[in-house]
Structures are given as C-alpha cells and as structure tokens.
Amino acid sequence: MSTVELGLRTEAARRPTGLREFARSFCRNRLAVIGAVLILFFIGMALAAPWIAPHSPTETNLDRRLQAPFWAPGGSYDHPLGCDHLGRDLISRIVYGSRVSILIAVVVVSLTMLIGLVTGLLAGYFGGLLDAFISRIVDVLLAFPFLIFALAVTAALGPGLVNMILALVFKGWVEFCRVVRAETMSAKASDYVLAARSVGLSNVRILVGEILPNVVPSLIVLGTFNMAVVIIAESSLSFLGLGVQPPTPAWGSMVNDGRPYMLNAWWISTFPGVAVAALVLSINLMGEGLRDALDPRLRD
Amino acid sequence: MLLEVDNLQTYFFTAGGVTKAVDGVSFALDNGQSMALVGESGCGKSTIALSIIGLVLYPGKIVGGRVLFDGQDLTKVPPREMRRVRARKMGLVFQDPQTTLNPAFTIGEQVAESILAAGGTARKAAWDRAVAAMEEVGIASAAERAKQYPHEFSGGMRQRTMIAAAIARSPSLFIADEPTTALDVTIQAQILDLIRRERERLDTALLLITHDLGIVGELCETAAVMYAGQLVERAPTASLLSDPLHPYSRALIGCVPRLGSRAQRLPTVGGSVPDLANLPQGCRFADRCPEAMDICRQDMPEIIRLENGREVRCYLHA
Amino acid sequence: MPEADHLITTLDLKKYFFVGSSFLGTSKGRAALQAVDGVSLTIRRGETLGLVGESGCGKSTLGRTLLMLEEPTAGQIDFDGIQISSLKSAEIAKLRRRMQMVFQDPLASLNPRKSVRQIIHLPLRLSGLYDKSSAADRLAKLLKLVGLAPEHAARYPHQLSGGERQRVGIARALAMEPDFVVADEPVASLDVSIQAQIINLLKDLQARLHLTLLFISHDLRLTSYVSHRIAVMYLGKIVEICPAEELFGRMAHPYTRTLISAVPSIGTEVRRERIIVTGEPPDPTNPPPGCRFHPRCPEEIRQECREAEPGLKEIAPGHLAACHLIGR
C-alpha cells in the first residue's frame, strides 16, 4: 500500500526531539540566554579566581581600611571597589566569594535532588505504608521554618561549611520529593505505564525506564530555581554567622560585615549584595527558559 | 433572513504560516430553520461558529466576508455590542459541560448570569427565570438543585444546564457545537429530544456543528459538509444522507457502518487532510479523490447550484 | 462447545475499587465501587467478542482485569486452561507475552519521551523471541503490517497524527505475537474516516494472525460491525450476550433495546422507535437491589425485578440474557 493510500503524513520526516531541538527552543528565549551567559560568567569567575583576583582576599591592611571605590574621593584603581573594614580588597573577596556560593549551590542541590528523586519515586509508585511513612516525614520537615531549623542544626553540630551543607540538604530534599511524588503518581495512572505493565516490565524497569524520563524535566527546572534559594539561604546563614567562618570570603557574611558601616562605607555590604542578586536573577531566568524549552507541548 | 454568512474568511497567523481555517464560506439560515455543519477535525466548522459569535481568539482573525445577523454585520460590530447580541439573541451550547461550567459558582448563579448579561432584569427576577428554565429542561427539583455546584451534576444534567442557559432569553438562534459528543448514547437521546422540543416551542433557528452524522439526521433540515475550510456540499439532510454527491461526502457517509450490515470492508478514503497553511492549487480534495480529473488539480471548483436546490463544489456535477 | 475452543473463561469475576481517603494506606472503612460485579463469560479462540456499554458500566475495568492488569477482588479467570487469577505476579509476567492491550487514547498510551522505534522495540526484546538483528527486521515488518512507513520509526508521538499513533499502539500490542488482544475503545478519539481505516486494519489483522479479540466500545455500530458475538454490560454485570447478527433484530434485554433505539439512524436505515430511558445512570458504589436496571426499565417490572438479581439464561441457542421478564 502506498503511503498516500494509507492516509499517512507525507511531510518530510522531522528530526526527532532531543538535544538539538531543546537547544533551539531555549535559544529563542532571549532572557534565558542572558541568564545562562551570566551564570557562565560567574562560574568562570569562581574557577579563575586565583588568576583574576588582583589581591589576596584575606590579606588585611589597616592603612586601607574603609577605602572607597575608585570613583569616590579617596579611592584608587588599585582597589576598584574599595576595601572593607579590615582593609581587604573587596573585588578579590567577591571573586573568591563566588566559589563558596556556587559550590554550595551545586553540592546542596545535587544531593537534595538525588534524595528527593529516590524518595519521591518510591513514595509515588508504591504508595501504601511506604508512601505514608515518607509523606509524614516530609510533612514534619516542611512544618519547620527554614532558618529555625538551620539554627538548630548548627547549634547542635557547630557552625562551618560542612554543617551548613548538611542543614540545607536535610531540609531541602522534601521539596523535590513532593514534586517527584506527585508526578510519579500521575504518571503511574497513565496509559503508557499501563501499557508497560501489560508488556511485562518489572516495577523497577517501569520506574527507571518509563516514569523517570518524564519526571526529570520538572526536576531539573525545580533544581535551578532551588539553586537560587540555596544561595540566598547560605547568604542568610553566613550573615548570621552560622555558615562559612571568617576569614573565608562568602557573600552573605560580607554583607553582614558591612552592616555597622552602612552609612559611611556603604560599598562593603552593597557590592556583595548585588552579586547575590545578580547570580540569583540569572539562575531564575535560565530556569524559566529551561522549563519552557523542556515542555514538549510548548515546543512546536 | 436571520443569519447570512457571506464569503467568510478566518485565518490564523502563526509562526509556521497562515492557516486558512475558513476560506470563503457562504450560507444562509432563516428564522426557525435548522442547519448542520458537518466535517472532521480541522475542517473549520468550529471556527465558523466562533467567527459568528465573535470569539475568534488570537492568532486568528476574520480577514474577509460578512456575517449578517438580524440586520447587523457582526464582523464590524464592537465587542461591547457583540456581547449584547450574544446575550440577547443567541443561545450557545458547547461540547464539554465539564469545562464550560465554572466549578466555583452554583448552577443557578451561572444560568442567571447569562440572563443578567443581556441586561434589563433584576437579580431576583433573573434567578427565578433561571430556575424556571431549569425546570423547563427537565431538571427535577430545580429550585434546590440550582444551589448545587457543577461537580454535583452528571454530564447529562450539566448539558441540560447549558441548554437552560441558552433558552432562558428565548433567543432567535441556537448555536450548538458538538452538544452530545461527550455523552452516553442514552443520555444523548434525551438531550436531542430536549433540543428538538425547545426549538419547536420557541421557534428558534439552529446551527449545529458536529462530526456525528446520526444526530444531523435527528435535528436538522439542511446539512452542509465542510472540508479543509470550505463548503463542499449542501443539501436537505435526507437527500444528503441517502444520496451524497461530492466524493468526500460520499466517503464520509459511506464509512459509518450501517446497523445490521456486516460487509467485509468499510470503504475508506486514503491520504490525509491538506496542510491548511500550504493548500494545493486546485480542488483541495483532489489528491484523495478516486474520481479526480486533470481540471480538478488545476482550478478550484466553484459552488454549483443544482436545480433541486442542492449545492456542490465539484466538477463532476458541473 | 468443547473446552479447548475457549481461550478465556471467567467465573463470577469481581473487581471492586475502594474509594475515599484511607488511614495509613489500608482499605478499612471505604465504600466499594463495584466496577465488575460477578461476570462469567467465555471467549472462543479466534473470535472477536464485542463488549458494549455506557460510561461507568465497567467494561474497561473488565478488559484490564482479564489481562491481570488489575487484581481481581474475587472470582476466577482461566487463560488457555491456566487459572491466571491465582498466579503470582512473576508467573503472570511469563504469560504476558500472550495477552496484550490496545488503548483508547493513543497520545496517553505512548510514552511522550520515546520514539516509535523505542516504544515497539521494548516488547520485542522482552518477548525473548528476537535477538538484536532479528528484532530490527521484525520491527520493520510490524510497521508494514500496521500500515506505517519505515520513516515513522524515528518520530515521536507528538509528531504523529491520531491514526498513526493508534497504529503504533497496535504494532506494540502485536510485537510479542499474542494470542489474545484487548482493544479498549481503540478508535473513540479518532475522526470518522480514520476510524474506518483502523477498524479495517483490526479486522484484517485478526483474520491474518488468528487473533482472539475483545473489542470494548460504547459505539454500537462499530462493535456490531467488527464482532462475532456481542456482550452488553450494565453497572458491572453482563445483561445480554448474543451473536452480532441478532443484536439488532432480536435483542431481548430491555436495556439493550433502549441502547439500540438510542442510536440515531443514518440515511436509508429503517427508523426505529425511540425508547427514551428515564433518569440518570445510578451510582456504582450503591447499586439498586434486585435487577440493576429496574429503576429505569421501560417495561412493566414485577416484584422479583425489585428483589432478586436475574442470572444470565440461555433464551435461544448462543443467546443469553439476564432478565426476569423474558420467556414468561
């Protein structure tokens, strides 16, 4: 039978959906591309810190205490964004500080995504007692306000980078678990999963082979938004003195350091604050672009 | 003439091109008459209905032709006036009562809303009329049930509610778009009966949009077949169903199995509907037509009026 | 009828769903939705049994339960002599190859993230009948069998038309060379002309591959066209089974008669008298006592209709109906 007789679409075969199609629809969204470029810029900054920072971030020099940025009286091109209350170069601290923020964002989000994915899949697919158990844990953890929780954890374990990561992961996985569980439950009820069962696939293969690919896009998008949240959380914790300890530069603690000097040396708090805002904004922009590009319905 | 659609053209402007959803459709409907627009998905029948009631959404636009209703050209009427026309003179019934009823409001409120939208009625009076309309369409204990919410009604009951809202203002024209497609066949029978009864009682004209040839026979005196944005045949329903002239009409009517017949194969038509953004030069059905001639592929056939009042768009009947 | 000719036999099959929220995931204290409530039927090898009924009658659930995609609440299912209703899931998995399903909504039943090739390849490999190279061959043959072109293998579901998607669904079901296929509303979401194509395809395939087919549909015309025998279902019970030719001429059960009279006639068909059934379909969690249809029955019902459930009785050779009013 000819294709005409069969009533088939005779248009030229279209390229299957995949990396290329995704990249194309992503790049159509200009804001998302800007976000992505900015993120790459920050990552580059973090990686190349030792080479691009003009000075050491931790070296103090009380002569240059509270020095203004280069366009203000008393400033110099040597320290373009000025110095903080201990005479440390602000630009170098910001550059090195990006390492902390990005490291934390990546580590925390990866861990929380993984834990949330596994628990969500199990809870959503198998239901029953397992689901009840996991859901109650999720409910309890969600009831705690985040900062109170982080305070409690660091009070118990002591401040520091690793403990802060632990606190963030411990609280953060529930968000992912909820989303993955909901998506798994709706995928489980769909006909294509029923078809997979009718073909004789085992539960594990269905979870991994059929449901997981459909859950991952939402997970990725949620992950990018979550990164922004984590960065702000780290800033808050460092601001409270619970996170990264001095003299390691972290944007949050830098903002805190500048608090007593807001009126006469505004730059100490402001520039790190702007850095946080810029990174978070770019992550959000890219996250929205990702979401739109990954949705097959919006693609065509 | 109550409704006159004159060479209506509604196009959709998308990134992929210009989709000519309705491309030069003309027909007329007089007071009290009933006509069906029949066709498969993508033929443009729903777009015609939306064009008539002025609800074509971006990126669609009426780009040509006129819709004369009760003396006004609806394509030139401002949205405010269009809303008044819709509320006062038209009764609309859509396909899926699940999505067309707002789950946050009671049934009574929604029926009353359509009465209030036409203006000139007080709130209490609108409620009373809504309840009366619900009783008229056969909803038992209408006064109590009007206070219930859509999720408490079954599919058939919800469709009755839509009809109640449609008849409440005694409109001169019903437009029903797939009114029974989502319903079970026994409930469908009830609803068809109801529509027929109300039409007779109010002497309202009916424009029915459907793909179901069965209900066309139940409700409409005339039927018009649509294909790829154009009318290809128009005839009294009985004649069309028993003796279709256009090859597409014949294929469409022929591929529904007859009750009690167990022929070996259902006659089918090969190929598929042309891309409405990329239409062929001649007759749009030519590449699938078993009787296509050379002229069919070169020149678009015009509508030919036959002596018995029937219309066909086909060189075979020139 | 010799037993060996029956591929599927069920005995008083029941499938209840427990609705409402539960405490800690148990089914204590929940209302039972009696989707399938005591169905005993047989499907002969090589025949197409049509299963008709309106929404909520349980036909889809029955189809899925026959394939053990839903666990029966009670009753027995025999497949080719094997009592599958009492098998453990590992043993059922082995039998899966022989019984497959075609779903209603092709868009929902195809994994949107997989290509046609991947979708059909999976059951091919799972069947254990093909190795890598012969599987590619078989894939090409399957595509041809259902009327698709080789270039369709690389496409994704959202790039196909409704008819093409349904063909993929059929190819997937046939990949494991099953004996029994359940088609659950296979053409309901398609255009009329595409429905005809797919129906022709199903008929052809059944004849060529000697399939046993359960054709579930609410569309009486299509079902009578495709099936050898037809079973009518109402509220979880089979109310009538008869050869397809007899459905329109000699239907016996009052529900069947209202169902058929409700189908609008087309063209030169003889116009039947319309029997309008009153009221709404009842609640499957709370079915009426006695005959389930008695509150809406257009006939004059008797006391026993209100009290006792009628069983399926043979009223003519090969024709069974469940009604107290017949034969008196």
Image (tube, coloured by chain):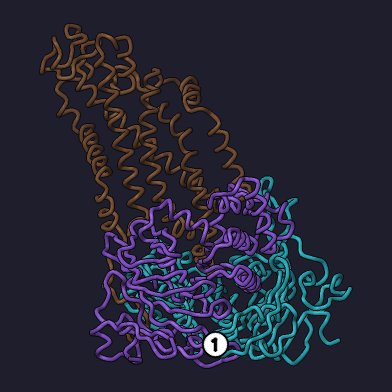
Chain colours: A brown, B purple, C cyan
Q: Is residue B207 above or below residue A222?
A: below
Comparing C198 with C128, the one in front is: C198
Pick the quarter of the image with the N terminus of chain A.
Answer: bottom left
Q: Position of residue C154 (x, y in %)?
A: 32, 70
Q: Residue furthest front?
A: B71
- Residue C49 figure quarter: bottom right
- Please name the amino acid that badge 1 sits on: Gly
Comparing A221 with B135, the one in front is: B135
Residue found farthest to the top: A63
Seen at 61% across and 49% down, the residue is B109
Say left or right for B19 vs A229. Answer: left
The residue lying at 46 percent from left, 22 percent from top is A154
Badge 1: chain ID: C
Residue A105: which quarter of the image? top left
Q: In the image, A199: left or right of B197? A: left
Dot 1 lies on which element? loop
Q: Can residue A112 be seen here?
A: yes
Q: Say which quarter of the image contains residue B195.
A: bottom right
Asked whether the viewer can see residue C128, the reply is: no
Query: Residue pushed farthest right?
Result: C303
Q: Position of residue B5 (x, y in %)?
A: 39, 70
Residue that mark 1 sits on: C267
Indicate the quadrant containing the C terminus of chain A: top left, top right, bottom left or bottom right. bottom left
Task: Decide if residue B143 is on the left or right side of residue A38.
Answer: right
Give the percent coordinates (x, y) of residue C26: 69, 50
Observer-nearest residue: B111 or B308? B308
Residue A42 position (above or below residue B73): above
Density class for disc 1 (Cα within 10 Å; few <14, some 14-19, many ≥20) is some
Q: Is residue A290 shown above or below C202?
A: above
Image coordinates for residue B105, horizontal then vertical, percent: 60, 48
Q: From the viewer's perspective, is C96 left or right of B286?
A: right
Count of picture labels: 1
